[in-house]
Amino acid sequence: MNHISLDCVIFGFNNNELKVLLLHLKYSKEYTLPGGFLKHDETLEQAAQRIVKERTGLNNLFLKQFKAFSDPDRSKSNKAIFDADMAGTKPDMTFFGKRFISVGFYALVDFRKVKPTPDLFSDRCDWVSLTADVTMLLDHKQIIQEAISTLRLQLNQQPIGLKLLPHKFTMPELQTLYETILGRDLDRRNFQRKILNYNILDKLRERKTGGAHKSPYFYSFNVERYKKALEEGLSGIW
Amino acid sequence: MNHISLDCVIFGFNNNELKVLLLHLKYSKEYTLPGGFLKHDETLEQAAQRIVKERTGLNNLFLKQFKAFSDPDRSKSNKAIFDADMAGTKPDMTFFGKRFISVGFYALVDFRKVKPTPDLFSDRCDWVSLTADVTMLLDHKQIIQEAISTLRLQLNQQPIGLKLLPHKFTMPELQTLYETILGRDLDRRNFQRKILNYNILDKLRERKTGGAHKSPYFYSFNVERYKKALEEGLSGIW
DNA sequence: TCAAAAGTGTTGCAGCTACACCCATGT
DNA sequence: ACATGGGTGTAGCTGCAACACTTTTGA
């Protein structure tokens, strides 16, 4: 008899940084991944959509299961945390004393469309940069790491850029996204040529103004061609 | 309150065919994936090892989680099946009436080392070729398909050849394995050159005799170099 | 006017594709 | 002897890596 929970790693891209949407717990002052429990007559995917919607206000997001976490020790510290957190609310303690299996999902969202919303146990809901060094609940840091590894492996199979970037974006922005996910630098010129060769981008006439220096062109994904290209996987290794 | 089950897709390679180890149910005459339930104080990975050991006799196999299946409709037909199957054995029927979440694992085993062992509900435990058209329980056919898709995507990240082939194997055997997983033919000469360039194979002096025609050399994996190469992923797309 | 970022072009090399030829073995 | 499969070699092309130069912009 086990309880199934979900943890969602919600990725957004802003200010040339990859960020994760986290809840800040009132009691323990730690950050935690948005999560929840699987309801009856709900698939894991539906539960993940529900959870992400509650935190972001967005429906129908791009979501992917990446791993089930089942170490019996994972949930042992749960009880203590919830004991304190829910003091006075008379929770069902037998529930939290039990064991949890958690299925990890990652979500890719358009940063600008999200309205971060805290839940009952948290005082804030923040975008936290991956480079930020914050304290996190349990093994949530590892879960985020696993999510990024998965992202990296699936970069050529999933519409990662399409889902993370706004409709219009510049080539340097796209490159930074790829560099962040891959964890290494790419040659600006080779990157541009390679990605353009896939024929999945439309170059717009418009340029991005306001920044210092030469203004870059905007691009947007040609969704049809992108989806088609992904079916075979974008060849080559970055 | 959910029950967690596991389904294991156990792959073996024999007679130049990729095969899956399946149980043949006494009652329904259908094939089913070896599976079981998660016990307390057991990780999913440990449970999978236990289940695979019961069917194959082998310990410590290469096992990988690939997806959790959670459609509420999946398990509805379970009750009927087990009602009939366990008639007279007084099982806990409330148990089987409940909902199941199943975590899919795939295992890669050396065909020749396996002793297929049926369980209580089955009269046989057979290696079934992927090309064979057999009737399978519930969505088990799709689960196998998902396992193969995963295999294909991970061909360059996981030691798939190493785990599926016997210690000594020939180049044509290795090629057939790759072709089966990828679902398409590869050029014999280019395949050989490419795989040899990875420097992960040791060519043995010995040749395979007994077949008609020219006898091919045996090769074996250089485990050390293979593991090392996989850390970065074998570059290139097949 | 200058520094920094962005657009564009070129060259060489590596690796893949698509082939052909020879060799060995059981029938 | 011969059909079939396995070992080895090569030519051409593609595409990537590693580069430099010019253009645009705000400060």
Image (spheres, coloured by chain):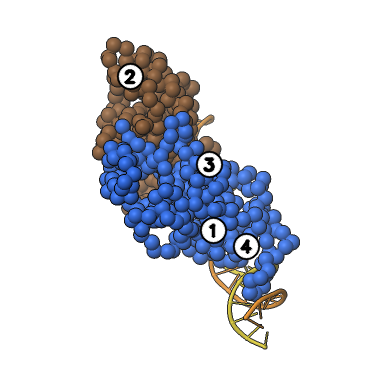
Chain colours: A blue, B brown, C yellow, D orange
Most foreground residue, A94 or A237: A94
Q: Which of marks 3 and 2 is in front?
A: 2
| Distance between the alpha carbons at the discs numbered 3 and 2 | 51 Å
User: Tag 3, which chain?
Assistant: B
Please provide percent x and percent y for residue A202: 69, 55
Q: Is mark 4 on a helix, strand or loop?
A: helix
The residue labelled by disc 2 is B93
Q: Which of marks 1 and 3 is in front?
A: 1
User: Tag 4, which chain?
Assistant: A
Residue B169: quadrant of the picture? top left
The residue labelled by disc 1 is A13
Q: What residue type is labelled 4?
A: Met
User: Tag 1, which chain?
Assistant: A
Please provide percent x and percent y for residue B111: 34, 32
The residue labelled by disc 4 is A171
Q: How crowded is mark 3: few (under 14 residues within 10 Å), some or many (20 or more)?
A: some
Q: Nearer the viewer, mark 1 or mark 4?
A: 1
Q: What element carries label 2?
A: helix
- Contact, CB < 8 Å: mark 2 with mark 4? no
First of labels 1, 4 by sequence position: 1
Q: Is residue A119 in sight in this rendering?
A: yes
Q: What residue type is labelled 3?
A: Leu
The residue labelled by disc 3 is B186
| Distance between the alpha carbons at the discs numbered 1 and 4 | 14 Å
| Distance between the alpha carbons at the discs numbered 1 and 2 | 50 Å
